[in-house]
Amino acid sequence: MTPLSIALNLALSFAGLAALCLAMDRHHRTIVGRGQSRARARALRLAGWAAIAASFAAAVVTADWNFGPVQWIGSLTGAALLVVALVSYRPAWIRPAALLALPLALAAALLA
Amino acid sequence: MGLVSALVSPALVSKVLPVTDVSSLPDRVRLRRGWRYRSEVAARVGLAAFGGYALAALATAFLSLTLPMVRSEAVATATLISFAILAGAVIWVFAARTLLLAALGLGLPIALLGLGLWLAFDGASMGPPA
Amino acid sequence: MRQGFRQSMAWLHTWAGLVTGWVMFAVFLTGTATYYRTDISLWMRPELRAGSTDSVPAAERGVAYLKAHAPRAMAWYVSVPQPDRPVIGVYWMDSLEAPLGQALLDVESGAPTRARDTQGGDFFYRFHYELQMMPTLGRWIVGAAALILFVALISGIVTHRRIFADFFTFRRDKSAQRGWLDAHNVTGVLALPFHLMITYTGIVTLGVMYMPWGVSAAYKGDELRFYVEAAQTTTWRAGAGRPAEALPLAPLLARAQREVAEPLEMVIVNNPGDANATVVAVFEEPHGLAHQHPQVAFDAVSGAVVERVGTLKPAARVFTSFMGLHEAHFASSALRALFFLCGLLGAATIATGLVLWTVARAPKAGEAPGFGLRLVRGLNIGTVLGLPIGMAAFFLGNRLLPVDLAHRATWEGAVFFGAWALAALVPLVRPHRRAWTEMGLAAGLLFGIVPVVGALTTDRGLDFLAFDAAMLGLGLALALGARKVSHYEARRQAAKAARPGPARVTEGLVEA
C-alpha cells in the first residue's frame, strides 16, 4: 500500500474512465467536437474496461487481496472526479491527460 | 407492479421519463395537503419504524438461535444482516400499494418469526447447552 | 405510497434525505475530519514534542500514577505513547456507570502533561457518533439517521436512475436546478460504493447496541461473554476481595511481547491491588482490514498467563472488518487522502440534495416563500456553512483561549457551538442568496486565518506545514465557492432584467 501502488492504480483508473467517457456520444462531442462511429465507441469502451480491469489486477498484486479492492474502488472515485472536472472545465485536456497516464502507470509499475 | 406497468404503458413512460414533477398537478397538491394523505404518511412512518425494527429484532434473535454455527458466529451473522432486513422492511412499507398491504407484508413474517423464536427457545431450553 | 415503485422511491428519497440531511451532513463532515484525528490532536497540543516512545517504561509510569491517584478503581487503562501521540494516556473506571476518569501524562516524567487542556481531534470523533450529547441519546439519534440515510441511498439509486447514463456529466451552464441535480448525482454516484459502505459499516460499528437481540437470545444478555467468544476481548476475572502485591509489570510485558509481533498499545489492569488482579497486554491491530487487537492476560500476582484472545472465525472476521473499513486505521497516507475525499463527496452529496429540495420548490416570481421553504433554507445555510464556521472557530479558540483557563476543554466546545449557533442566526436577518455568499466568505476567512493565528501564538515554526496547508486549502475553496455564488447571482439578476417573465425549467428532475 505504498504511494506508488496508489499512483499506478489512479493512473490506470483515470485512463480507463477517460476512455469510457470518450465512448459516450455526448461527451465525445464535447471533447472532440464531432460524433464517432459505432466501432470506435466500442473500441474505446473495450479499452476503458480493460484499463479498469488492469487497475484492479495492479491493486491486488501491489496491495494484496486485503486492501487491493478497497484501494481500487478509492482510486476509481478519485480518477472519476478528475474526469468529471476535466470534461466540465477543460475538455481539451482529457485526451492528452489520458495518454500521459499510461506511461506514468508503466513507470509506477516498474518502480513499485 | 408499478415498474412493469410503467415499462409497458407508453402514456406512463412519457410521464415518467422527461418530466416527473407530478407534484405540480393540481389534484396532487390537494391530495398532498389533505388530512387523509397526512395520516397515511404518519401511519407508514410509524409502521416502518416500529414494525420494521420489530421484524429486524425478531429475525436477529431467531437467526442467532438457529443458524448452524457456533453461537458467537450466529450472533455476529444475524446482527450483521439485521440492518439490511430493517432497511428492506422500511422500503417495503413505503413501496406497498396500500397501507393494509404494507402492514400485512410486515405482520406475516413477524408472526412467523415470533412462532419460530418461541419454538427455538423451547428447543434451546430442552437440548444441550449451546 | 404513489403509483408505481419508482414514484414511491422518489418520494421516499426526497423525504428520508430531507429529515436526516442536516444531522448526517454534520456526521459526515466531522467523521471525515476524524480521518486526521491524531494530526488534529497534535496541532491542538503545540506544547508536545515528539519524544521517546519506549512503551514499557511509559506503561510503568502510567501504572505508578494510577496507583497513587485511583487506588480503588475497578480497572486501569494505560495507553502507551505513539509517534503521532507523544503522551501517556491513563484512564480509570470507578464503577460500571460512572464515566471513565482520565489524565494525560508527560512521557519522560510521568507527571500530568503541561500541554493545554483540550479534547483535540477527539472532539470531532465523539461528535461524529454522539453529537456531544448524552452518549446513549446521541448514538441512537445518529444510528436512526444513518439507517434512514441508508434507505435514502437505496431509494436514490432507483430515483436518479439516469446516474449511470449521465456518468461524468455536470451541466453547470443550464438551469440552476439542472446544475444542482448534476452536482448531486455526480458526487453521489462517483463515491457510491463509499457512501453505501460507510453508512452500513457505521451502523454495524455500534450494531450490538442498536440490535442487542441476538446477544440477548443466545447469551441471555451476557454481552461480555459474546465479545470473549467472538475473540474481541479477554474474560473479566472477578476480584477475590483480599489485597495482594502484584508482580513488577515490565517482565510480564516483555513475555507478552515475545509472543506478538505488533507493538504494545495499551496495558489494562483489572481489579488492581486484589489477589485476583489481571494484567492484560493489548497490542496494535495486525496489518489487515479486521479491527482486532492481539491480547495476552496474566495473573498479576502469580505471573501465569490466564488467557490469550482467540483467533477470528469467519463471521466475526467480517464483522470486525466492517468496523475496520469504517475506521480506516489501516490506510496509508495516500489511501487515507482518498477516504477523506470520499467523505467530502458524501457531505457534498447531502448538501446538494438539501439545496436541490429548496431549488425545486423555489416560489414563482412575485410569490413569497412559504414557512417550510424558509425553514429549510435557513437550516441548510446554518448547517452547510454554520458547521465549518464552528470548526474553524474551534481551531481558533484552541490558540486564543488562555492556556491556563479553568475547564479549558469545555470552553473550546462552547466556542464551537457558540460560533455555529451565531452563524445559524445569520440567514434569519440576511436575504437568502446574500447569506450564502457572505457566510461562505466568512467561513473561508476563518479557516484562512487559522495558520496565521497559529504562527503568532506558538513557536512551532513550520512544524505544522501540512495542517496549515489544509486550513488554507479549505479557506480558499470556501471563498472561491462564495465568489462563484455571487457571480452566478449577478448573472441571474442581469438575465432577469433583460428577460422578464418566470420561465421556470423543471426539466428532467425526478421528484414527486
Image (tube, rainbow, N blue to C red):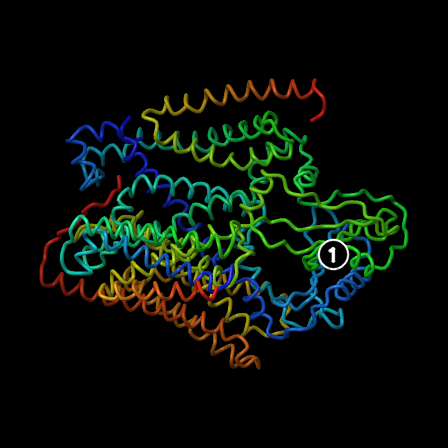
Q: Residue at x 52, y 70 (%)?
A: C397
| Quarter holding residue B97 | top left
User: In which quadrant is the N terminus of chain C drawn?
Assistant: top left
Name the residue tied to disc 1.
C267
How far from the left and from the top, in percent, is residue C135? 58, 48
Give residue A60's position: percent from left, percent from top. Answer: 48, 52
What is the three-letter code of the residue carrying label 1? Val
Residue C220 placement, left or right of A11: right
From the viewer's perspective, is B129 left or right of C346?
Answer: right
Q: Residue C128 at x, y = what percent? A: 51, 53
Q: Is residue B105 above or below residue B87?
A: above
Relative vertical location of residue B124 with respect to residue C449 in this rendering, above or below: above
Q: Assess disc 1: are there few (<14), some (14-19) or many (≥20) residues with their C-alpha within 10 Å of its C-alpha.
A: many
Can I make out residue C428 in this image?
A: no
Q: Is residue C336 above or below residue C401?
A: above
Secondary structure of the residue carrying tag 1 is strand
> Which residue shows up at 51% across the image and 56% down it?
A63
Left or right of residue C220, residue C289 in this image: left
